């Protein structure tokens, strides 16, 4: 998984007919090749083929498991949702909804049923203090 936006890295389609730039935070790819001699590796981000140097390894992290927040905006064929105790701020109905709607075909929920009940009951929305209103109104 790409963990920060990189607007400059170049990619091309598998057939090499389409080229572009940019791989973004949360993009999921599969390592297709590692070239130890040239210190590069090839990653397929859903038909965007990208060559990374070993120096750029810090832009990636394994995505065999991820948080609900990191998965927002993405969908996966199968999702396994681990129901474990956490901060009450994280155990909310909206977080549960986000987690469940990431699954296209299969959702497996494992863990403590009481945690799920707590999430369903917790429909409080966390207020965000971004200062956006003040910035928009010049205040």
Image (cartoon, grey):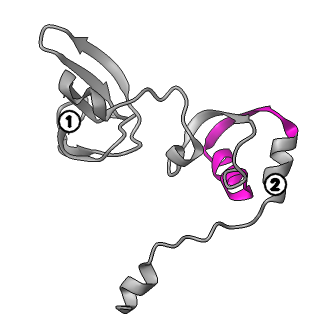
The residue that label 2 is drawn on is 120
Binning the other alpha carbons within 10 Å of mark 2 as few (below 14), some (14 to 19) or many (20 upward) gives some
Q: Which label belongs to residue 105?
A: none
The residue that label 1 is drawn on is 12
Can you give x and y, in whole percent of width and height, for residue 10 in the image?
A: 17, 39
| SS at mark 2 in the image | helix
Name the image quarter holding residue 12: top left
Which quadrant holds the N terminus?
A: top left
Q: Does 18 appear above or below 137?
A: above
Q: Residue furthest left?
A: 38
Q: How many marks?
A: 2
Q: Residue at x 41, y 35 (%)?
A: 28
Q: Does 70 appear above or below 56?
A: below
User: Does the magenta-highlighted stretch encompass residue 108?
Assistant: yes
Q: Is residue 34 visible?
A: yes
Q: Earlier in the sequence, mark 1 or mark 2?
A: 1
Binning the other alpha carbons within 10 Å of mark 1 as few (below 14), some (14 to 19) or many (20 upward) gives some
Can you give x and y, in whole percent of width and height, for residue 135 in the image?
A: 37, 83
Question: Magenta residues, as a range?
Answer: 91-113
Task: Classify residue 80 as left or right of residue 37.
Answer: right
| SS at mark 1 in the image | strand
Q: Does 43 appear above or below 124?
A: above
The one nearer the camera, 71 or 32, is 71
Q: Residue at x 67, y 51 (%)?
A: 90
Can you give x and y, in whole percent of width and height, for residue 137 in the image?
A: 39, 91
Q: Is residue 53 visible?
A: no
Q: Does 3 appear above or below 138?
A: above
Disc 1 to disc 2, C-alpha distance: 43 Å
Which quadrant holds the C terminus?
A: bottom left
User: Does the magenta-highlighted stretch encompass residue 87?
Assistant: no
């Amino acid at each position: 998984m790409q963990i920060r936006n990189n607007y400059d890295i170049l990619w091309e389609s598998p057939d090499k007919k389409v080229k572009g730039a940019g791989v973004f935070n949360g993009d999921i790819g599969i390592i297709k090749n590692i070239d130890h001699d040239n210190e590069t590796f090839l990653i397929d981000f859903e038909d965007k083929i990208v060559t990374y140097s070993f120096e750029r390894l810090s832009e990636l992290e394994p995505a065999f498991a991820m948080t609900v927040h990191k998965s927002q905006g993405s969908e996966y064929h199968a999702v396994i949702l681990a129901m474990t105790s956490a901060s009450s701020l994280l155990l909310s109905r909206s977080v549960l909804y986000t987690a469940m709607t990431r699954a296209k075909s299969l959702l497996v929920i494992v863990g403590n049923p009481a945690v799920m009940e707590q999430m369903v009951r917790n429909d409080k929305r966390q207020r965000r203090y971004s200062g956006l209103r003040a910035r928009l109104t010049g205040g």
